[in-house]
Amino acid sequence: MFIVVGLGNPGSEYARTRHNIGYMTLDVLSDRFNIDIRRHNFKAVFGEGQIRGQKVLLAKPETYMNNSGFSVMELMNFYKCAHGELIVVYDDIDLPLGAVRVRALGSSGTHNGMKSVIYSLGYDDFPRVRVGIGRAGETENIVGHVLGAPGKEEAAELAEAIAKAADAVQLIVVGELNKAQELYNIRPKKEKKEKMGEEAERTDDN
């Protein structure tokens, strides 16, 4: 069985914020596969069902983001799933808006929710799907950005990315993680050009 965890914060005031991308991705999967996410246990709200014939549990930790690991640890300890059967979906401020990235393992980066998960579990060799929310503007701090709601155009772009994140989860569940990486771990042309420009500037400065 796969445990798919979407990171976020509980409560209506956080429902549509950028930091709740993980919750939103689980909502898409819930709708697609008719999995009710409304049981409460393991410091989470969750539901069980199937994705393409594979048994899954969709879980939203209710501990608030920075303590997400407590919930994930309880889930893993109870269901005794292998490391590779845990999939965590979350927002990433270090990725461009709307980008989706799939990894089989790795560090938490700058995400406090993932820091909590990895610290609580004691390992980081599990798949994760990240959705880029872009960086804060010049007049906005990081907390205000991640806990803020996107505007209309940004929300539409994020909705597309969330659908792709759900697609990536489906691929991982059926054993096609490599295919998910091939599809989504492609640097967009705009991002490539920006990176090349930054490298050129550094060269000129030297």
Image: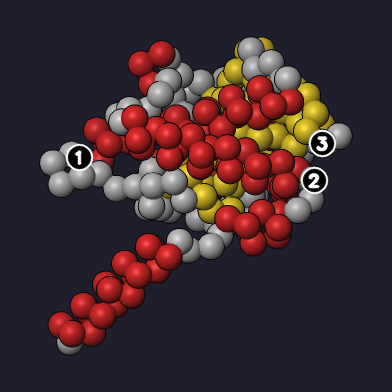
Q: Position of residue 85 (x, y in %)?
A: 73, 43
Question: What mark, if any, has residue 52 been given in the picture?
Answer: 3
Q: Is residue 84 left or right of residue 159?
A: right
SS type, badge 3: loop
Who's the residue at 58% across and 20% down the image? 44
Residue at the spot of label 2 = 174
First in sequence: mark 2 vs mark 1: 1
Relative to 190, does residue 25 appear above or below in the rendering?
Answer: above
Residue type at mark 2: give it.
Val
First in sequence: mark 2 vs mark 3: 3
Q: Name the quadrant of the N terminus.
A: top right
Who's the residue at 36% across and 37% down the image? 154
Residue at the spot of label 1 = 141
Q: Position of residue 50 (x, y in %)?
A: 80, 29
How is the rendered protein coloured? secondary structure
Q: Position of residue 130 (x, y in %)?
A: 51, 47
SS type, badge 2: loop
Q: Quadrant of residue 74?
A: top right
